[in-house]
Amino acid sequence: MVESPERNAPLSASREDYLADIYRIQAVGQSVNTGEVAQRLGVSAASTSAMFKRLAQEGLVHYESYNGVWLTKNGERAASHIVRRHRVIERFLTDMLGIGWERVDEFANRMEHAFPDEVVEAIERLLGDPDTCPHGYPIPGLDGETAALAGLPAETLAAGDHAVIRRVDETDPELLLHLRERGLMPGKAIAVVAVNQVDGTRTLRTGDGTLVVGQRIARSLFVDRVVDDA
Amino acid sequence: MVESPERNAPLSASREDYLADIYRIQAVGQSVNTGEVAQRLGVSAASTSAMFKRLAQEGLVHYESYNGVWLTKNGERAASHIVRRHRVIERFLTDMLGIGWERVDEFANRMEHAFPDEVVEAIERLLGDPDTCPHGYPIPGLDGETAALAGLPAETLAAGDHAVIRRVDETDPELLLHLRERGLMPGKAIAVVAVNQVDGTRTLRTGDGTLVVGQRIARSLFVDRVVDDA
DNA sequence: CAGATGAGTTAGACAAGACTAATTGCGCGA
DNA sequence: TCGCGCAATTAGTCTTGTCTAACTCATCTG
């Protein structure tokens, strides 16, 4: 396995996209195979395969043909850096510019490759060093350390449970719009009024009122249960 | 001359760089030849020649072989848009993030290709719709209209003249650092105490005190004379 | 345990945009 | 006005990252 010829050479935007994606897949505990990455990045499996080989050559991932990749120490450092940029930029877009959280992922994907570290850090300070992106995912530190993903799917809640939303699935803009309109955002408290065992819908009470959500939404909300000490 | 096949297709980052540069050269009234653009963008003359041909094909510039290019209406619209992004980003970096004005041109060059229009406009509003970049160059409007470049070189000032700095040469970071340290920035008032006819140095009085500047600096400051009605 | 099936990989091509080297054209000075 | 020097263009190559099509491997099923 040959190491990268240039020590700390800047990564191409493409490489950054692949690495960040591998990182995000690993973060939820899935194994990283060609098809998964190809689909998420919207490229062909062939392109993904080719990039896996390049990244392995440069010591950023381990690659076993037909068996997927996983990040090396170097790769993880690089990837956490990129994800950090992405999430800080998302925060910036929502908190300072007032852009809807359903659009900031796409915007950040375009912007993240172009931000000098110094700019990211200045934004971070200005925002008061936020811990998470607007969807509740942790912002990796400068040292590469990242908090564990918070919360379990709201599907796991039973009637009578109380919980706090910690993060939401960030991939689908339409879903995000729905969630925001219903006040289902990180930090919000919810209580499960009832679970319909037939169709899987749940009746929730939030600060704003009562609403019924289907499985799609229940799977997209990640919550911490609150022990009811009343 | 074949028009662009895609109406309003997004421009590549490379095209944007060339167009913006052509725009800036035109703005100071120079003719735009291959060598000039090549040097400013740090690419070979051959690459520039090839790009001129492509831009002409797409109807963004008029191109006469061996005689340079100039922007078409479409090209000017596109270019002003890019320059607009660049200058808004520079303002953002200095005014909101506190980054030194000697570095924001370079940063903005990296960032300008990745900012969605909506983000540029949100930043602009947040900054209170500034008229110029930190170096004093006008920010083109959404309609493509751009104010004329303000000021004449401070070289043209004589002893006893009073003036206000309108803009400064933005190309050399070292020079910009010098200028800032001496308080020579857009909006600042200066008075010419003396002009040394032998070596061309000028003694200036600013709000902060008296200083002597050489020709290099005098050529880099663009000022409006103030008629002394005392 | 032999196919079938589908995911993954290889092969080959292409587009953008850069480079160097070779050539061409313009304009100035003698 | 001839030719010289320099700027500009053309010719040809390289790199990066993509694609489609063809092939290969692993696995699941009958």
Image: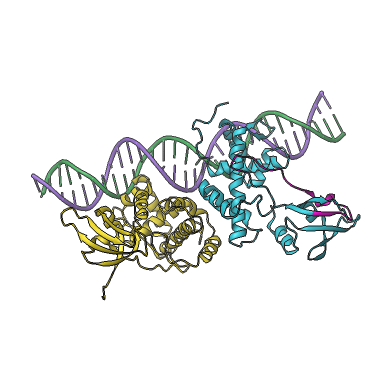
Chain colours: A yellow, B cyan, C green, D purple
Q: How many marks?
A: 0
Majority secondary structure of magenta residues: loop
- Give left or right: position of B111 versus A109: right
Which quadrant of the figure has residue D11? top right
Q: Is residue B18 visible?
A: no
Which quadrant of the figure has residue B74? top right
Q: Quadrant of the N terminus of chain A?
A: bottom left
Q: Give the residue drawn at x 26%, y 54%.
A: A213
Q: Residue furthest right?
A: B197
Position of residue C29 relative to residue A210, above or below, is above
A83 or B85: nearer the viewer: B85
- Give left or right: position of B204 versus A4: right
Q: Residue furthest front?
A: A209
Q: Give the residue drawn at x 31%, y 49%.
A: A35
C22 or A28: nearer the viewer: A28
Residues shaded magenta? B141-163
Q: Position of residue B113 (x, y in %)?
A: 54, 47
Position of residue A176 relative to residue B206, above or below, is above
- Give left or right: position of B94 versus A109: right
